[in-house]
Amino acid sequence: MATTAQPAAPLRHSSPRFGMAWVTWRQQRAALAGACGLLGVMILYMLVTGLQMRSALSSLGLDTCHPLTAARCATAVSLFNSDYDIWRNDGLVLMQVVPLFAGVFLGGPLLARELETGTFRFAWTQGTGRTRWVITKLVLVAAAVTAAAGVTSLVMSWWLAPFVAQDWSLMGPNVFALTGIAFPAWTLIAFALGAFAGVAIRRTVPALATALAVWAGLAITTATTLRWRYQQALTAKGVTAGARVPGNAWVQTHWTGRGGQPVSLAAFHALLAQLKGQGPTSQGPTPVTKTLLAQLARHGYTQSISYQPESRFWHFQLIEGGWLLALALLLGAATVWLVRHKAA
């Protein structure tokens, strides 16, 4: 009796367990290398200059000064700062934009390029759904760039040590966002803004421009207005107010006149010049000495110093890192929703 052979079952080509992760790595390795390379340049700069600063501290004998602010060390500290203040000032200003470019230029093209060219349709026909496609890309790339930013933040803390030893505040606007968990948080939010703008606009260049502008506005607003309000500032008033404020605090100074009305900075310096007997053409603001403070007090002017002590550094870091992480997660969820419901 003849038997009929059963037809062979069709072969199933199952995708590798980590197939999407591998594809994401293959597609984004150049962009990741660029972003990590930018952070790497920042790390290299800090390592080279940091070692030079420590060599200078040793040659000036400052490595035996404890504390570095001791009166006997003043001349050597002045020599050290004259050589390295430009790194502390201009260098930190330039570093502020590193998380912006590392995050935005990685997140912006991540999805926008595929949506713009239409190649996302091919990915969705290969057994990878929309949700898995977008979440895998977002999570893997975000984790990589945030981890690299975290390492950069650790090196920054080491680099700043010679200046912090001089009672230089970690709470200052030029320093706070580059240290602790704030630096990786700002890098992550730049990436999230770029990815969201890329899906919403679906064009790479406009998405990059939009994310850059939004990040810059958010960073400036936080540094100039929002961060100061994380916790009620402490206040010291009167002629001896400056002596009661810790040297490493983040300080804002205000002056009020006889009627308790605020005095503008220009009017205040004009008054100082008048009390000191300087002419109207004298260059630069007049230093506020103890004698001038006493004269101002006799004329009814009161100094009021609001300050955030450095003891609040990690409290502020957790607050800022927390709301930036929450915002990044919200943008990530919105990005996934747009891909699921709007992309076609």
Image: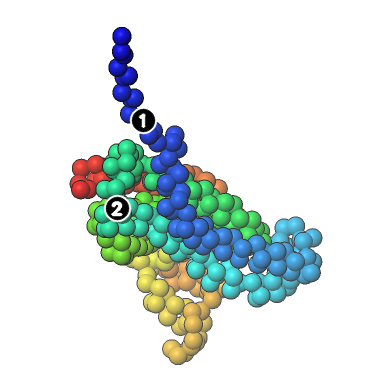
In the picture, the quarter occupied by the N terminus is top left
Can residue 11 be seen here?
Answer: yes
Residue 60 found in image quarter? bottom right
Question: Looking at the image, which is closer to me, 255 or 57?
Answer: 57
Q: Position of residue 308 (x, y in %)?
A: 49, 53
**Residue appearing at x 49%, y 48% in the figure:** 144
Q: Residue furthest front?
A: 1
| Separation of residues labelled 1 and 2 (CA atoms) | 26 Å
The residue mark sitting in front, 1 or 2, is: 1
Is residue 30 shown above or below 311? below
Is residue 45 shown above or below 272? above
Is residue 15 shown above or below 176? above
Question: Looking at the image, which is closer to me, 161 or 210?
Answer: 210
Q: How is the image coloured?
A: rainbow
Q: Position of residue 162 (x, y in %)?
A: 66, 61
Residue 226 found in image quarter? bottom left
Residue assigned mark 2:
119
